Image (cartoon, rainbow, N blue to C red):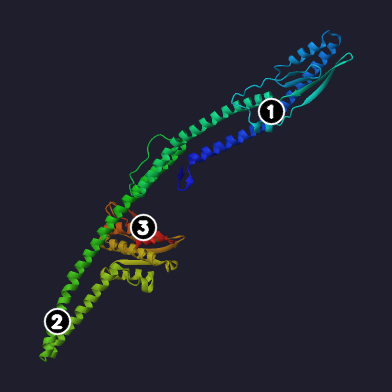
Amino acid sequence: MLVGGEMSLRFRLIGLVCLVLLISLALGAAIAYSNASRSVRTEMRAALLVGRQTIENTVERLQTAGDSLHDLDDLVASFNGNRHLRVRLSGEAAAFAAPATEKATLGGVPEWFVRVIGVAPQRVQIPVAVGARDYGTIVIETDPYNETREVWNEFTESLVTPAVFCGLTILLIYIFIGRTLQPLNRLAEALEEIGDGRYRTRISGRLAPELARLRDSFNGMAVRLAETDADNRRLNEQLLTLQEQERSEIARDLHDEVSPYLFAIGTDAATALRLLKESRTSEAGENVQSIADAVRYMQRQVGRMLGRLRPIGLSEFGLKEAIENLVVFWRRRRPEICYEVMISPQCEDLGDLLATTICRVVQEALSNAVRHAGPSHVAISIEHDRDEIRVAVNDDGPGMQEQSKLSYGLVGIKERVSAIGGRLTFSTKLGEGFAVIAALPVVISATATTAEA
């Protein structure tokens, strides 16, 4: 089986086991060859030695025997059935005895195996003379075929056990690894489901300890992804709510503040044009002055709306000027409150995203303090602390009884701070004021920047 152009783990293990078995068989065959060749040579030497001694002893006894020729025939005939020797008497009375060829268990012995064993026949000639009479010569020749056949039978029989073992091992590996990998297939399917956004996917069932850890890690990841997805949905809903609220405020301002003055400008312009045509210049001047007053008023209203969309002075003059503009806005409207601002010099040149986030935190926290806390003193501090910016807005109002009842604005800046990897906390004690504290990372990843954008 090939997966993605590569051999699967199951067949890799099977191939590895087969390789080990083949190496083991090769080593075993080498050892068996060495022992078999030595065994055949030893057996042939022993058979030749025994045969020679037998013939020499018999010839010696023939010196006193009556019928030497008949005894020689019996001597040669006694070697019939010998497994390793071929005996031939040449001379006055020829006789021959050959070993019986035994059959191999698994068929004939292959020629290549005979060549591998490499034991050549050996020959010995014994002259036979009784008294003064020469009866010829007895030739003894070894025949290693039967011994080689025995070695071949032992060799082939010894292969049965490893072959059966190899087959069973491969079968067990195939079945066991297949069952073991089934949870991994389920994990792959579960990961695909997670990739499709189905974060409720879980893996259950009893598994091996190693796979159980993998299952628990996957389930934990799925839980965290589900929580993150729920937080993102809640954040999107809050952002949409805040967007709609801000759009409604801008629409209301345009309708209540700008639209009437545009209508008035149109009316004054038409009246002034009519008066000028009638040469009533002095009266037309009053209408022109009304138009100028209306334009100045609309400029202030449009500037206020633009300030809500983007902090005034941030891109032109920097963070400190933008914070001062926010304080000036409220100082004009609530001059009885003492405003204290402390900005560290290291907090300049922080980047557009981080500076805008700081302005939004100060803007909302300051607006919340002035409008709802009724304080006599508000302190704003922006400090550079190692690898983060610490923003704090404190008031000396009565404090908040229930932090769970935060305004949409505070919830919005909390989500904004979280989006860039920061932390926003609230500190309050009844009768001791309320504090908004933000810790913002100086280094913001491109992902957070894109998400915020």
Q: Is residue 391 above or below residue 158?
A: below
At 47% from the left and 38% from the top, the residue drawn is 210
> Sequence-wise, which precedes: disc 3 or disc 1?
1
Of tags 3 and 2, which is closer to the observer? 3
Tell me the quarter of the picture where residue 75 sits. Answer: top right
- Residue 282: x and y in percent read 14, 89
Asked if the residue at tag 1 contacts the one at tag 3, i.e. Cβ–Cβ closer than 8 Å, the answer is no
At 86% from the left and 9% from the top, the residue drawn is 64
At 55% from the left and 30% from the top, the residue drawn is 163
Tell me the quarter of the picture where residue 300 sits. Answer: bottom left
Disc 3 is placed on an element classified as: helix
The residue wearing badge 2 is: 268
The residue wearing badge 3 is: 419
The residue wearing badge 1 is: 36
Relative side of 391 to 7, left or right: left
The amino acid on which the numbered mark 2 sits, given as a three-letter code, is Asp
Asked if the residue at tag 2 contacts the one at tag 3, i.e. Cβ–Cβ closer than 8 Å, the answer is no
Of tags 2 and 1, which is closer to the observer? 1
